[in-house]
Image (spheres, rainbow, N blue to C red):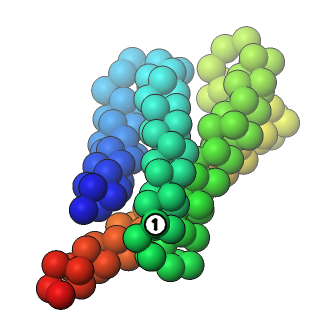
Amino acid sequence: MCGVALLAAWLGAALLVAAVVAPAAFAVLPSRTLAGALVGRVLPIVFWSGMLLGVVIAALSRSIGAGVVGIGAAVSLMGACAAAQLYIAPRIERVRSTIAGPVDALDPSDARRLAFGRLHGLSVLWMGVGGVAALVALIVMARLAASRSAA
């Protein structure tokens, strides 16, 4: 049951960041640069906790017999968060460091703006993959908990 609660909490936090915090930051802060800085401070917490949770849920899934789907979903959660935080985020920072002002001020055809957009899209994709993996793991764990309590 602990795994269900942990997965539900992480999934709720990830959804809150993606669906509420990020859009609100871009809507109310005076510049996109400030909004990006705010979201950039929140996302590492989501990604690092997703990596840790993936390890915990994989071990828990293995010990309680959640099967290949449960373990695979947990490993996918960990991998997606690791890809976003350890591979994509540093590349985004490298691109940002080459830009003197806001990304939006660059010409739309500027290679740095294009690279930033591509990397941002990949970060969003990995967060989505992590969310789907967490949901699958949550369903597996909840079903397993329900079947054990019914027995």
Residue 107 or residue 142, whichever sits in front: 142
Say which of 28 and 40 sits in front.
Answer: 40
Q: Quadrant of residue 150?
A: bottom left
Q: Residue at x 56, y 78 (%)?
A: 68
- Compared to residue 132, the image places residue 111 above or below, namely above
96 on left or right of 34:
right
Residue visible at 52% across and 37% down in the picture? 48
In the rendered image, which quarter is residue 138 located in?
bottom left
Q: Amino acid at mark 1?
A: Ser
The residue tagged with tag 1: helix, strand or loop?
helix
Can you give x and y, in whole percent of width and height, for residue 19 in the image? 34, 49
Quick one: quadrant of the N terminus?
bottom left
Q: Residue furthest left?
A: 150
Residue 37 in view in this figure: yes
- Name the spot of residue 115 as percent of width and height, x first: 78, 40
Q: Residue at x 37, y 41 (%)?
A: 17
Q: Give the class, few, some or many, for how many residues have Cα within 10 Å of label 1's Cα (few <14, many ≥20).
A: few
- Image quadrant in which the C terminus is located: bottom left
| Residue 30 sits in quarter | top left
Can you name the residue that lies furthest to the right here? 111
Which residue extends farthest bottom? 151
Determine which residue is flagged by label 1.
63
Asked whether, in this view, residue 54 is left or right of residue 123, the answer is left
